[in-house]
Amino acid sequence: MENITENTAQVNEQSTTTQAETPKRKQGEYQGRYKKACLDIYEKLQSLFGVDAYAADIVAFRFAADFGRLNAANSEAKVGKVNKKGESTLKETTITKKVAVTFPIKIARAVQWADEANENFILYKSVRMTLNDECMEFIYGL
């Protein structure tokens, strides 16, 4: 019985040490596959819709988590032929249809739409865009 207690204490001590060593992510800095998308959402939520940096960061991070989770089961990966230099092409294809969209994904779509509007000669100075109350309640309820 004493061995079990000692082992449990050692495991708990190791877990605490591991957690303390994990570096915290800085606001507005992203890693991984959706890094570019997260940064885009983070910046444009602030510039286009006036969302504060903290809330924009959480929405962008949640977008990546949701998007990855929804696409994980449908991903197909292929490796091309290796050339003489030992290099190859990696290809990944994912198509996920008819999924229930989460708020962070809906918000990302709104950001894309607003950005596309800008590319099609709609000036943000002349058009005031805001997110609806339901969306703002979600963002600030995070």
Image: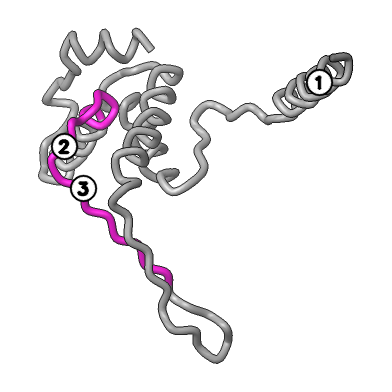
Q: Quadrant of residue 51?
A: top left
Q: Secondary structure at mark 3?
A: loop
In space, the residues marked 3 and 1 are separated at their CA atoms by 42 Å
- Please tell me which residue is depicted at 34% across the width and 33% down the height of the picture: 66
Mark nearer the viewer, 3 or 1: 1
Mark 2: which secondary structure? helix
Sooner in the amino-acid sequence: mark 3 or mark 1: 1
Quarter of the image with the C terminus is: top left
Q: CA distance from mark 3 to mark 2?
A: 20 Å
For label 2, the residue is 113
- Residue nearest the observer in this picture, 6 or 90: 6
Residue 105 colored in magenta in the image: yes
Badge 1 local density, few (<14 within 10 Å), some, or many (20+)?
few
Q: Residue 59, which numbered label?
A: none
- N-terminal of the two: label 3 or label 2? 3
Disc 3 versus disc 2: nearer the observer: 3
The crowding category of the residue bearing disc 2, from other C-alpha atoms within 10 Å (few below 14, some 14 to 19, many at least 20), is: few
Q: For the residues carrying marks 2 and 1, which lies nearer the camera in this image? A: 1
Which residue in the protein does label 1 denote? Answer: 13
Q: Residues within 10 Å of mark 3 (few under 14, many from 20)?
A: few
Instruction: Give x and y (percent) for residue 124.
Output: 18, 29
Compare marks 2 and 1 and give the one earlier in the sequence.
1
Residue 55 or residue 7, whichever sits in front: 7
**Which amino acid type corresponds to the residue marked 1 in the rendered image?**
Glu
| Kind of residue at disc 3 | Thr
Magenta residues, as a range?
90-107
Measuring 25% from the left and 23% from the top, which residue is drawn there?
103
| Residue 9 location (% of width, % of height) | 82, 17
Residue that badge 3 annotates: 96
